[in-house]
Image (cartoon, coloured by chain):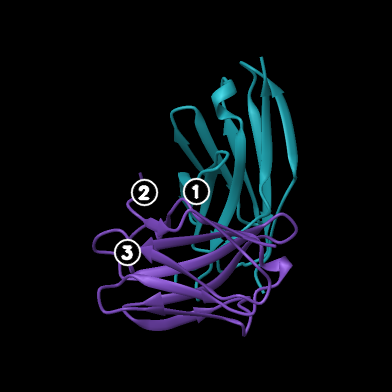
Chain colours: A purple, B cyan
Amino acid sequence: DSGVTQTPKHLITATGQRVTLRCSPRSGDLSVYWYQQSLDQGLQFLIQYYNGEERAKGNILERFSAQQFPDLHSELNLSSLELGDSALYFCASSVEGGNTGELFFGEGSRLTVL
Amino acid sequence: GEDVEQSLFLSVREGDSSVINCTYTDSSSTYLYWYKQEPGAGLQLLTYIFSNMDMKQDQRLTVLLNKKDKHLSLRIADTQTGDSAIYFCAERGGTSYGKLTFGQGTILTVHP
């Protein structure tokens, strides 16, 4: 158990819909990262938040947005969903400035868009 | 930008050694990591190596880093069927604010 909690584990929805994925980082971790894993793209970095502020942005579509709340949990909002958005979405957290810089991953939220 | 490449498949017999290779492009990488993903699970950190090291050994795992060639390898000694999984190489750049760039993963299959 990494200590990172993601909900929901599975989600099935239709094209055009909007969903919200939630992540609770490990206790004490200030940084939260979102990654998308798909068969064709592999693990793609989407976005990072640190203590409520956006820190780095990767290959995140404009239809997607994220935020980190004062209690440090984070949400990833996916809107106007397309078939190609079907993927496993991982949240990870880390201790900023930690010696090893490792990321601790949740078990992921599997999104299926029909 | 940063890029990390791995071979996609590796098949070995139980008891043999497995070697998974990875190349990366970011010369400012500070740490390099090996993560393991089992079916239906998240990524689990196996080991990491700091960029000023050449080798790190941790029980059955040996990591070799050739910084000049930007080549990283993971050797698993006495590979077991429970080692069957996807193995990801990842690098942390010097200016990436902590985000990791992952390779596409190597699917390791261990045959009895």
Residue B22 appears in view: yes
- Residue A26, by quadrant, is bottom left
Which mark's residue is nearer the viewer, 2 or 3? 2
Instruction: Indicate the amino acid at tag 3.
Output: Val
Separation of residues labelled 1 and 2 (CA atoms)? 9 Å
From the image, tell me which residue sits under label 1. Answer: B42
Side of A36 where A68 appears, left or right: left
Which label is found at residue A2?
Answer: 2
Q: Are marks 1 and 2 in contact (CB under 8 Å)?
A: yes
Which label is found at residue A95?
Answer: 3
x and y percent of residue A83 in the render? 72, 67
Instruction: Indicate the amino acid at tag 2.
Output: Ser
Instruction: Indicate the amino acid at tag 1.
Output: Gly
Q: Is residue B54 above or below residue A85?
A: above
Locate the N terminus of chain B by quadrant: bottom right
Q: Are marks 3 and 1 in contact (CB under 8 Å)?
A: no
x and y percent of residue A43 in the render? 62, 59
Q: Secondary structure at mark 3?
A: loop
Which mark's residue is nearer the viewer, 3 or 1? 1
Q: Which is more N-terminal, label 3 or label 2?
A: 2
A76 and B45: which is toward the camera:
A76
